[in-house]
Amino acid sequence: MKKIVNVATPAMCAVALVLSVAAFNKTNAANPSSPNPVVSSAPAVQPVDLTYAAEKSLPSVVYIKNTQNSKVQTVEYSDPFEDFFSDPFGGFFGRGQGNGGKRQRQVQTPRRTAAGSGVIISTDGYIVTNNHVVDGADELTVTLNDNKEYSARIIGTDATTDLALIKIDGKNLPAIQIANSDDVKVGEWVLAVGNPLGLNNTVTAGIVSAKARSMGSGVSSMIQTDAAINQGNSGGALVNTNGALIGINAMIYSQTGSNIGYGFAIPTTIMNKVVADIKQYGNVQRAMIGIKGSDVNVYVDAEKEKGNEVDLGTMEGIYIAEVVEDGAAADAGLKKDDVITHIDGQKVTKFGELQNIIAQKRPGDKITVTYLRNKSKKNVTLTLKNEQGNTKVVKNADLDVLGGNFRAITDSQKEQLNIGYGLEVMKVSGGKLKDAGVPKGFIIQRVNDKSIKSIEDLQNVVKEASTSKEPVLYIQGIYPTGKKGYFAVPLEND
């Protein structure tokens, strides 16, 4: 379970709400002859029956075990005397260039396990959970409510929304009913269902405390609840009184790591979009409106603290602090100091609501923006773009796009070249490496400022770069002669 500690930025902040349950007592009129009034309490009445919701949702929530096998890893450590004692003249007579006291050694990592929750969303075995629940897994084991166990495979993940789609081979599985989280109301009763603190098949009750909470970078537009959520609830279900899914539990606001009344779930409107994209494209097609800004009231309050009086014509909406060059908003003519009030006729009062709407769109989708400029109402239709500034489908690249074969360098290569790690290019058969001029025999050590010690490291960097704003690999390495080399390898989609 992710923890958020003291989340607050000038642009947006998570407002801590203090909620209490008021005790309503029936007071009898005091007997005039009695010195003390008599007060009797009405019997406690549960406001809503939650047993139906628990019965409906529990079979659909699973326990997920993440196993990371023991591995041999190369780690760097510092030895400040290494260069001096190996060469007291600091390389003056030709041995190497000094290593800055850096040395490498191999260590055996222990076998590790972690656990979380997941929700069955289809009878044929698709399960939604959090990305951080399955991240780094060598093996995934899913245990159903009836204690049946399955091995699971990862279909796709998205770190930005912290969602993952996994699959088990099963039939007629108890899939949960999925509700529209946009219909959820603040104050509505909900259940959090999961496996917290090793206590499997646990439900806790609370209400929806707030909607469209922006929790810093990445995960946005969250449902806030006071239903108790703890570590192990990650990836579990937040359900309404009908037992229908309204969100995927993802994080808690805590300074201790345990529940103190604030939990957050990713709404189903965002979950449905992520699942559909992973199934169709293999990764999330993320739309960008191309602005930076904050809630109007946050901006106005910040200006007041500076001694500036600001009148934007409203205290609700999104204040545009910056328009991204060549973005969708810039193309449509939006400017700094404009205030967005509606998207497609839907009122937006805060940034989290805007994020929720955009998160359900894809690059190429059109939206109508209503905004205020100098207090004057205007409308414009714009076309959303991807992070790379166009409307093409963005696909994750893998090593095949490079057109090469690789292997980790040998011990003799490490000793001969005085290096601790790297991948040797064993073959170049076309693709991006050949286009960029990377030769056979070249040893790749760093890509985009990340150390490359294994083929998995290279695969992860290629995948990350292919969907980034700048889809380029900046490769640093060394030739077999010891000469350093640098290459830029573009990964644009064809």
Image (spheres, grey):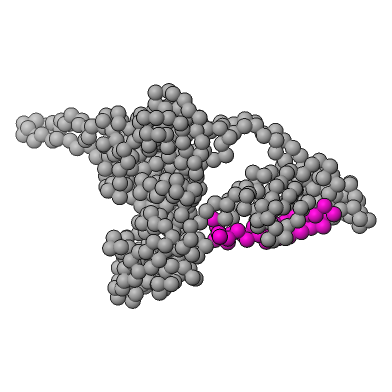
Q: Is residue 229 left or right of residue 485?
A: left
User: Which quadrant, please, contains the C terminus?
Assistant: bottom right
Q: Which residues fall within the magenta stretch?
A: 467-494
> Residue 374, image x and y in percent?
33, 76
User: Which residue of the protein is positioned furthest toward the right in this rendering?
Assistant: 93
Residue shown at 40%/66% (left/top)? 383
Say how many tags the image has.
Answer: 0
Residue 93 in sight in this render? yes
Q: In which quarter of the image is residue 26?
A: top left
User: Which residue of the protein is positioned furthest toward the front in this rendering?
Assistant: 429
Residue 30 magenta-highlighted: no
Residue 487 magenta-highlighted: yes
> Residue 492, image x and y in percent?
58, 60
Q: Quadrant of residue 373?
A: bottom left
> Residue 402, image x and y in percent?
65, 53
Residue shown at 47%/50% (left/top)? 281
> Residue 403, image x and y in percent?
66, 52
Q: In this view, does 242 lie above or below 389?
A: above
